[in-house]
Amino acid sequence: MASVRVERTEDGFVARNDRGAEVLMGTGDEQGVFTPVELLLVALGGCNIVTVEPLTAQRGHRMVRLAMTVQAEKIETSKLGPITITYDVELPEGDEKAAEVLRAVAQRVEEKYCTVSRALRETTEINLELP
């Protein structure tokens, strides 16, 4: 089971996992913090890139640079429009198949193997437990 604790602090909001990592959050007016929507985009990009990288490398096509930008616009106060993942890649020199392998792996990861992508695309039930 995946679990994080999110709480209000003196300085804003923080999310912590049981391994001691922290992410500072806010409304977007503060410096040095992520908004919840940005964290959603981080989760989507992170899920994709940490799955794509080892799969392309295992196939013998490790990218020199592998990065991405994940963007979405709010189309209503509490609704996002389409999310776009744009890869920024430097292919290995002389590797004729690297681009083809990257495209195939990235497509398959986004469609089938990235848990965050699937949670956004498919129905994921959310249950509130209130006092």
Image (cartoon, rainbow, N blue to C red):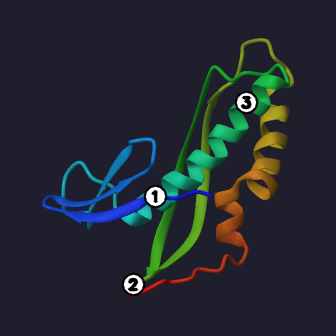
Residue to which mark 1 is pinned:
4
- Give the residue at the far left of this rendering: 10
Label 2: how many Cα within 10 Å (few below 14, some 14–19, many 20+): few
Circle on res. 51: none
CB within 8 Å, label 1 to label 2: no
Quote the CA–CA distance across marks 3 and 2.
37 Å
* SS of the residue under disc 3: helix
- Give the residue at the far bottom of this rendering: 131
> What's the residue type where badge 1 is placed?
Val
Residue 5 sits in quarter: bottom left
Answer with left or right where residue 25 lies relative to residue 3. left
Quote the CA–CA distance across marks 3 and 1.
25 Å
* SS of the residue under disc 1: loop
- Which label's residue is closer to the chain start, 1 or 2? 1
Circle on res. 77: 2
- x, y percentage for residue 104? 84, 42
> What's the residue type where badge 2 is placed?
Thr
Residue at (82% x, 49% y) in the render: 108
The residue nearer to you, when weighing 45 against 65, is: 45
- Which label's residue is closer to the chain start, 3 or 1? 1
Residue at (45% x, 48% y) in the render: 18
Kindly report which numbered mark, 3 or 2, lies closer to the viewer in this rendering. Answer: 3
Residue to which mark 3 is pinned:
54
- Which label's residue is closer to the chain start, 3 or 2? 3
CB within 8 Å, label 3 to label 1: no
Label 3: how many Cα within 10 Å (few below 14, some 14–19, many 20+): few
Kindly report which numbered mark, 3 or 1, lies closer to the viewer in this rendering. Answer: 1
- x, y percentage for residue 69? 52, 47
- x, y percentage for residue 60? 83, 19
Above or below, 61 against 75 in this view is above
CB within 8 Å, label 3 to label 2: no
Quote the CA–CA distance across marks 1 and 2.
26 Å
